[in-house]
Image (cartoon, coloured by chain):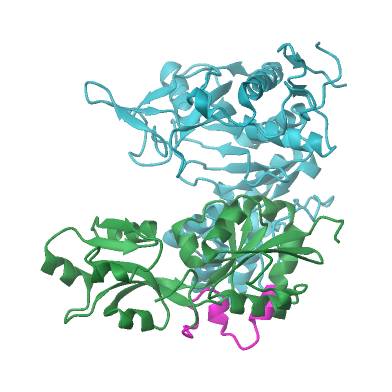
Amino acid sequence: MVGSDVTAVGGESPGSFSGDFPGKWVDCTGNRLAAPADLPGNGLDGWLERVACLRAAESVLRELFLAGGFREVTLPVVERVGAERGKEAGPHVAGMGGYRFLDGEGRVWALRSDVTPGLARLVWEGDPGGTRPRRLFYFAEVYRRVPGEPAPTGYLQVGVEVIGGQGAREDAGVLRLAEAVLRSLGVPEFRLTVGHVGILREMLGRAGLAGDRTEAVLGALQSRDYVAVREVVRSVLAPTEAERLLELLTWREGSVCLPGRDVPPGKDGSLPGAVPPAREDLGDRWGELRALFDGGPSPERVVLDPGLVRDREYYTGMVFEISLPGVSQPVGGGGRYDGTLSPEPAVGFAFDLEAVLAAVAKGLAAGRGRARVSPASLDGRLQVAAIH
Amino acid sequence: MHDEEPVFTLAVPKGRVFPEARDLLTRAGLPAADLLSEEGRLVWRAGAVRYLLMRPRDVVSCVREGVADVGLAGKDVLLEDSGGVCELLDLGIGACRLSVCGPAGPDRCWPALLAERGHTLRVATRYPRVARDFFGRRGYSPRVIELSGAVELAPQVGLADVIVDLVATGRTLRENGLVEYEVIGPITTRLVVNTVSFRWKAAAVRALCDQLVRACAPGRPVAAMRGGGGDHHGGDGMAGRQ
């Protein structure tokens, strides 16, 4: 019944969702991929409740995205390999990290492992010179190869892309939308950790690191190897300059300063983060970063990590990741990717809907937060709850 | 009895690196670290810290999955698979090296062995990814045979031409008629943290780093702390050594 309070997701009734989602073996229409004998622990009822919960969540998000001026897009689950623009090898090539196969004429195809590349290509090739920016969203299964798993693992990815959108204001809007998504699903606690690859590159160059050393530092930051970051920086810069840079990127040995939540955004114009960059570190990019935070999500939800690097062959500017307490890995993230997937500027994000909903369920079980959506009735009807 | 949640959970490797790890944690002032034992209980709660004792190779998996917030992991294991964890400190303990080793002979190098035998190089190892990367960078695509232990046996029984494994003193190699051909890289124990704990437990992780850095300092070369190659004191390796 729309508009009522939701039933807590706790597993009290036979048909309700009991905590963790039972599995990930479903295609984009909700059909299972695995054999019936592989039904996860909660059996068919649990599986049906899982699908019902996902569809209810999609309804809430669709409403949110449409209200924000976004339009829904769907893309084929199979992609032609070799149709990509740009480098032959890279994470944006169809099927990288996933599954490829041949058709009868020797052409290579791939199960979709990411949505953004195909979407950027669709806009660029399907509507060159058209209205910009294009604000699009999608719900899509992506398939990736997980070591040790016997079959493709499907993730229900939800994402938004702003193709043709430029500037820090657009970036801030995407951050705000990410926050709205998490709030709308009833996630009790979350954090957006924000960095900026473009500014970081400039900072490294200004500090005196040559091109190959800059790439080495970025590579180490991307793989979260802070030992290697220190090695490279100390091998190139004088001690004082090296420690100043490391203070920003990682922390100082002996006086550890990790990027964290401890320092709230300052009223004096400083930025949130344990070691906020000084204006001189950012040069004329200060205003850009400032605008990102001024127009972005709630201050208590966002923290700046100047050393945050996500796929550096892909992202060119603002980057961010979404983390939830008690969930072992970030559940999503995004950023700006101007000119890497198509010649246009673009920014967006994506997240694993099941991981987010599982966190909501855990929060409810622990007495935290309120559900925005849940499969609440035993007769299989969906409820989209409006909490006021 | 501890009613409150631990501030953080620390995964500690059992095996050859355990005595050094326990000493380091004790010097760092972690509660009851000196009482840690490889025998008996595998889960310990002392004050705000919960200790998990496990095989060295399992530390990274447990930290990645969030079962432990932080852990002491060998660089050898991290080279094989470091996704999902942050590598914060080189603790300098458990120093050894990862090397290509093979039968003792006049040339003592794997290219000569390859030329002599005239077939695709066969490499036995517990580190298939490291082995493929190492030979791949040199233009070779060897047949990699993954083993879980007693790797030094492989050349003797004709299973492989060379091995890629940890070397500390080299005694085990000598006992099995093998020599070290080429060092792939130095190996030490690292402090790793789960990527989400890194964000949400920053203060606790920061305090732990402070304590460990101070504990590393006395009598230990700075290069070892900073991962500059380590002081190869012939100590034990991570997941076993030659």
Name the residue rendered at 68%, 80% in the picture.
B215
Say which quadrant the N terminus of chain B sits in. Answer: bottom right
Residue A175 locus on image (x, y percent): 68, 35
Judge left or right: residue A43 versus residue B83.
right
Which residues are drawn in magenta?
B212-234
Q: How many marks?
A: 0
Q: Residue at x 79, y 43 (%)?
A: A299
The residue drawn where x is 54% and y is 65% is: B56
Q: Position of residue A12 (x, y in %)?
A: 80, 27
Relative image position of residue A286 (x, y in whole percent): 67, 49
Say if the magenta span includes residue B216.
Answer: yes
Task: Label the green chain with its letter.
Answer: B
- Can residue A17 be seen here? The reply is yes
Counting from the top left corner in percent of width and height, residue B233 is at 49, 86
Q: Nearer the viewer, residue A341 or A156?
A: A156
B205 or A13, which lies in front? A13
Q: Which quarter of the figure has residue A350?
A: top right
Look at the image and tell me whether residue B28 can be seen: no
Instruction: From this view, report whether residue A92 is shown above or below residue B122.
Output: above
Tell me the quarter of the picture where residue B2 sits: bottom right
Magenta-drawn stretch, dominant element (helix, strand or loop): loop
At horizontal 78% and vertical 37% (from top left) the residue drawn is A363
In front: A162, or A380? A380
Where's the C terminus of chain B, which quadrant?
bottom left
According to the colouring, which chain is cyan? A
